[in-house]
Amino acid sequence: MVRKEKTTTGMRLPPQHQGLEVKIPSFFRCPISLDVMRSPVSLCTGVTYDRASIQRWLDSGNTTCPATMLPLPSTDLTPNLTLRSLISHWSASAASCSPIAGSAAFFAGPSPAALVRQVASSGADPSAALRELAAYLSDDDLDEFEKNALVGAGSAAETVASVLRRKGEQISVAGAEAAVRVLAAIVALDGIEDANKRRVAAGLAVDAAASAASLARVLRGGSGLEARIDAARLAEFLLANAGAEAKVAMAESSELVAELVRLVGPVDEKGGLDKKAMDTGLSCLAAIAGSRRAARADMVRLGAVPAAARALHATTEPSSSAKALRILESAVGCAEGRAALCKDAELTVPAVLDKMMKSGRDGAEAAVAVLWAVCHKYKDRRAAEAAAASEGGLTRLILLLQSGCSAAARQMALELLKIYKVNAKSCLAGYDSKTAHIMPF
């Protein structure tokens, strides 16, 4: 047998490659850790890193590419599937000549396939098997191609999804949480093919109402915030990939909506908000708001308007602001939503104006729609006065008009200009229903 090549840098191979007695191609190694990459992802600079290593680099506050030291205009990570496939084939080929027969040897206990069979057994409590499956799927040292095969040919997605379709008395909160952890891991893994990820949505959609009830139970009684976030992400995935009937069932689940609203709110006694929890909750609520008009009044009744307004004040992320604005846009489509927003108009309306140019085009147009509904169409005095008194509100509307917005948003913005009264000190010469006369500064 060929001796393993020695290096002068003291490179440490990950467990699944420690038995390989072959030379490792240099481009299989992560430039940061120098280990063989398990989940190769590329930055916008074109350099590929192992996901765990580059994520730690970015989470530490770095804004440059480690290899080139160029500034990063975007921190998006794109899976390098070609390189992943090459590493997998190389690993399988080399392992056939090695005393170590692949990554499965490193997973203690029953095989993953046996765990799936245990979960499928109707007479047994699946909690323990589900926790082991979650540990297997979350282990970065194990081969993701084997995980993909388990989800696809092994029917793990459908089997675990069936656990969440069980009625409340048939499955404990701990069992439902373990099932959520497994399915959330499947959805999050880069190595799982999209077709196999959609198996999760298909399995939950078989009885979407029961699945929504189980997700609400985990959101309400999960062991920690991470479990609640996983449940919300799973709900969002189902809303994005299920059919119309399943989306309606999810939107009509009052207990699910109530828990999503709670997820957006404070997470401790001091009233602190968790960024990840808030963003995930907003994503789900925005998806529900956009899927069924009849869900608006129920969302408003359960507190979606103050939750979205609170998020606008708290977040600096454009994507989170846009989601909160879409929720408010949906809410003002019903009388209850307008009443809830205008109840605290002096706080909510300035927040909407403030985020108008800080939340992307979709967020800006949602903000205009919110203001137009309460200030112009339904002429709420409190909202109009709050908008007129907001510092910089007029400037933001003018900027929006110059930003290339849609024709509908432009018309609404022009009509909103009417609420700004012209006086002798104003830099507006005047305004009528047809033309805005704007003097240069």
Image (tube, rainbow, N blue to C red):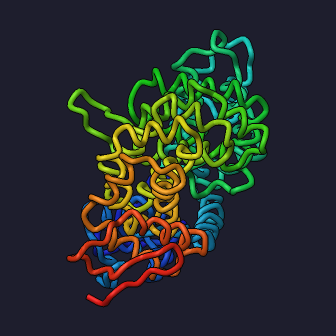
In this view, the residue in front, 400 or 342, is 342
Answer left or right for 313 relative to 380.
left
Up the image or down, 370 lies above or below 82; here it is above
Q: How many callouts does the rendering have? A: 0
In this view, the residue in front, 319 or 393, is 393
Residue 250 falls in image quadrant: top right
Name the residue rendered at 53%, 26% in the picture: 177
Up the image or down, 97 lies above or below 284; here it is below
Answer left or right for 434 relative to 268.
right
In this view, the residue in front, 385 or 344, is 385
Q: Quadrant of the C terminus?
A: bottom left
Outermost residue toward the bottom in this view: 440
Name the residue rendered at 36%, 60% in the picture: 353
Measured as percent of width and height from the top left, residue 167 is found at 68, 15
Measured as percent of width and height from the top left, residue 145 is found at 65, 55
Measured as percent of width and height from the top left, residue 23 is found at 49, 73
Answer left or right for 175 relative to 71.
right
Name the residue rendered at 51%, 29% in the picture: 301
Name the residue rendered at 69%, 41% in the picture: 200
Q: Is residue 416 visible?
A: yes
Q: Quadrant of the N terminus?
A: bottom right
In this view, the residue in front, 64 or 220, is 220
Measured as percent of width and height from the top left, residue 190 is found at 57, 58
Up the image or down, 48 lies above or below 162; here it is below
Q: Is residue 21 visible?
A: no
Answer left or right for 129 relative to 70.
right
